[in-house]
Image: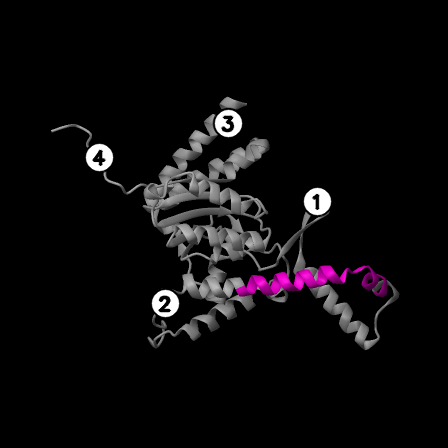
Amino acid sequence: MAEVRNFIENMLHLRLIELASVRKSDAMAIYGPMDMNLPALVRDSIEATSSEYRNDILTIQLNTGGGLVDSVEKTVEILRHHYESIDFIIPGQAMSAGTVFALSADNIYMNYFSQLGPIDPQFYVDGQWIPGLGYLEKFEELNEKSRDGTLTPLEYGLVQKLDLADIHRFEQAREHSVELLEKWLSTYKFKNWTKTEGRGTEVTPTMKQMRAKQIGQDLNNTKRWHAHSRGISMQTLQDEVGLKIEDFDKITDLRKSVKNLHSFIEEYIFMEPELMLPLVRTGYYYSTQPEVDHEKD
């Protein structure tokens, strides 16, 4: 097992070197849930290398079904402490809290297969992740029926079982997710947005905040997307949500390195699930330091 682990880690290192070389940046792969361990794992991965050997730019290849927004917030704080610019590549999916994470980027790269998801905070309950907005929508529906006096006996029983503390927690998480998205979009994604595309009008901080708020509301609208698990394609994000997304398929070297890294990690996560932790969060640091000639004159 040790030999297999060493082989996997060495191959992963080579794949990250390939991505870092193409991007001319440090590179990190994050595959798996956005759980409570994520901030510390990312911190340790970065701090394992001296700051003098780190680049100012980090590329993160991300694939996740979602997780905890609080963990995402702390992780972004850590990343921004060490890096001036952070770009995300989504080869497969970044759902829910993963969408919030991806939208903290300066630039986002996707292709026709990639997808983000609605911003639907998840909670780990009884051994499984559950979407919070579905509970909130059902609560609001039952609350409206209660006011109208149209609750059925079955629905009344459901109301009795609802935990108001959980409802409050879900509401706070929903609001917090949108607030984070608005802050990060206006600060990072929109930082170089200076003129509107149509009239060439100067873009003000207020315009950036309003645009970010609209995107947050769009992605938080479960009635529009219908399901927590529904993916939102690159094309939809561009055309309907109004997000600027770069297509990594149009960059030959990048497409190849993204595919190589993604295929390798996906294959070994499924084949050797017990080896998942050392795989999913690791980094390679792209040095721009000149080589030193140690020969004496």
Q: What's the residue type where badge 1 is placed?
A: Gly
Q: Report the side of 212 relative to 24 (left or right).
A: right
Question: Do the residues bearing badges 3 and 2 touch, measured as CB atoms within 8 Å?
Answer: no
Q: Is residue 120 visible?
A: yes
Q: How is the image coloured?
A: one colour
Q: Which residues are magenta?
A: 156-179
Q: Earlier in the sequence, mark 3 or mark 2?
A: 3
- Quarter of the image that includes the N terminus: top right
Question: Magenta includes 159?
Answer: yes
Task: Specify the quadrant of the image occupied by residue 151.
Answer: bottom right
Look at the picture and state if 196 lies above or below 158. below
Residue 121 on image: x %, y % = 62, 57
Separation of residues labelled 4 and 3 (CA atoms)? 33 Å
Comparing marks 4 and 3, which lies closer to the viewer?
4
Task: Specify the quadrant of the image occupied by residue 258.
Answer: top left
Q: Report the side of 227 relative to 89 (left or right).
A: right
- Quarter of the image that includes the C terminus: top left
SS of the residue under disc 1: loop
Compare residues 32 and 175 and report the one nearer the observer: 175
SS of the residue under disc 4: loop
Separation of residues labelled 4 and 2 (CA atoms)? 40 Å
10 Å crowding of disc 1: few (<14), some (14-19), many (20+):
few
Q: What's the residue type where badge 2 is placed?
A: Trp
Separation of residues labelled 3 and 2 (CA atoms)? 45 Å
According to the image, label 4 marks what residue? 292
Separation of residues labelled 4 and 1 (CA atoms)? 53 Å
Question: Do the residues bearing badges 4 and 1 touch, measured as CB atoms within 8 Å?
Answer: no
Question: Do the residues bearing badges 4 and 2 touch, measured as CB atoms within 8 Å?
Answer: no
According to the image, label 1 marks what residue? 127
- Badge number at residue 193: 2
Look at the picture and state if 205 lies above or below 13. below
Q: Earlier in the sequence, mark 4 or mark 3?
A: 3
